[in-house]
Image: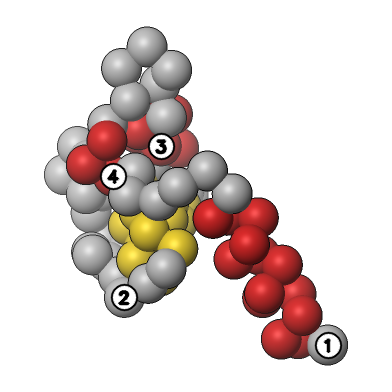
Amino acid sequence: MNLNTRDRCIVCFKKPESNFVLIKHHVSYFPEVIAFVHYKCHNKIHDPKSPMTTFIQYDNGDSRKFYTQQKESKN
């Protein structure tokens, strides 16, 4: 499921800059929930001093488990 489209960043609500696209950020891996954000906004989400926990709804290890399952399903 996508929370937004690539037309506007869900963090700052601005459009992508010319010649750039918004990147995917996993809000959750199980179930898979994607938000499209600017690279700088992605860094803000994961800022160690003040993470944006609204956009981090997964446990440690979920990303490794998710990508392992993705890799195995392609084989």
Q: Residue at x 75, y 75 (%)?
A: 71
Whether the residues at callouts 2 and 1 have beta carbons within 8 Å, the answer is no
Query: Which residue corresponds to mark 2?
Result: 1
Q: Residues within 10 Å of mark 4 (few under 14, many from 20)?
A: some
- Real-space Cα separation, disc 4 to disc 2, in angstroms: 14 Å
Query: Which residue corresponds to mark 3?
Result: 42
Kindly give the residue lying farthest to the top in the view shown: 49
Q: Secondary structure at mark 4?
A: helix
What number is the disc on residue 56? none
- Please state which amino acid type lies under the numbered disc 3: His
Query: Which residue corresponds to mark 1?
Result: 75
Return the disc, 4 or 3, that comes first in the chain's sequence.
3
- Real-space Cα separation, disc 3 to disc 1, in angstroms: 30 Å
* Between marks 4 and 3 in the image, the one whose residue lies nearer the viewer: 4
Q: Secondary structure at mark 3?
A: helix
Query: Which residue corresponds to mark 4?
Result: 55
